[in-house]
Amino acid sequence: MAQEAASGPTQQLTDAGTSIWLDDLSRQRISSGELADLMGNRNVVGITTNPTIFSKAIEEGRGYEQTIADLAAQGMDAESAIIELTTADVRDAARILAPVYEASDGQDGRVSIEVSPELAHDTEASIAQALDLHARVGEPGVMIKIPATLEGLPAITAVIAQGISVNVTLIFSVDRYLDVIDAYLEGLERASAAGHDLRTIRSVASFFVSRVDTEVDKRLDEIGTPQALALKGKAGIANARLAYKEFNAVFGGERGEAMRTAGIRTQRPLWASTGVKDPALRDTLYVEELTAPHTVNTMPFATLEAVADHGDIGTDNITPGFEDAQIYFDSLAELGVDFADVTELFEEQGVQKFVDSWHDLLATVGEALTKAREGVREDS
């Protein structure tokens, strides 16, 4: 694939202040030059990963065969092999993105890798693994993903206090988002006291979007009235807009300027789960409606291509919607939809889905190691 200059909707999105990160990574994307091409012709300036992404990539092969054979020959177990495989991919991707990291002063050029989802409710183990993953990758562009569970919040603070950049994931409610901001700022206070350069520490707060619509729309369908059905497909965007309103309140204006003068970097909102799941909705909806300065949108490859093909990008489609977003949630409450209950369910389900994906990844890698060992025995 020849590298071209970025243009069209992805350039417009970048110009509007929304960084495009790709929610996907594989050895094939790295070794084929596709990642570098996406940087040039799709404005991709970052990568996010999770167990599901790696499980799919490894299951489909995509260039892992020789490495898995080598790890099998070393007698490595599945969990250790996963760490070797994923940190290698993240390291290589971070090196490809290094020019972006340098040009953006560390704001972009980031590649995220997640602590084991099984540690989501174990603060100390999350901290230990975050430090280990950071050391293993060994590139300044790495970000460690830690979920915004109640046990994850102190882990986020502790890891940032070590001078490490963090992608806070699995955020579903504005209230929890405010807790995440507090955890970030407390971590920076500790980092400063420990002598770390605050200018090198970055963080994003990952708000899940389409999953919110999936659950809320299910409840609206159960109510079934015209008023309820008219609210479908809007909860995720409204929720993200209220989060951005809080972001502006904390990091905007005079307070934000004072923070920046002190070396504190803005913790940007990141819109995650932006692939549209309802075929009745426009496939670029969660990108077009959540374009605004100082944001990140991490997209599955299919969504990125849809945006590049027919995205209709504005300059700020979030701020003008603050009032309508609040009206929307008032309307939900009037219909009896308890959004606090919804977000509690999201967190529980979100953690469990990633745990299930982690188990799938363990099974995928374990099977690949077994096949590699059996192949060696057959050849001997």
Image: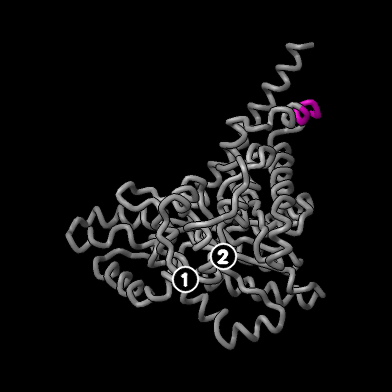
Residue 214 shown left or right of residue 111 in the figure: left
Q: How is the image coloured?
A: one colour
Q: Residues within 10 Å of mark 2 (few under 14, many from 20)?
A: many
Look at mark 2 in the image and give the residue it sits on: 205
Q: Which of 344 and 218 is in front in this view?
A: 218
- Looking at the picture, how far across and down is residue 42, in whole percent? 55, 52
Say whether disc 1 or disc 2 marks the residue closer to the N-terminus.
2
Q: What amino acid type should be assigned to the residue bearing mark 2?
A: Ala
Displayed quadrant of residue 143? bottom right
Q: Is most of the magenta stretch helix, strand or loop? A: helix
- Looking at the picture, how far across and down is residue 14, in whole percent? 54, 63
Look at mark 1 in the image and give the residue it sits on: 243
Q: In this view, does 306 lie above or below 84?
A: below
> Is mark 1 in CB contact (under 8 Å) with mark 2?
yes
Q: Quadrant of the N terminus?
A: top right
Q: Residue at x 52, y 71 (%)?
A: 293
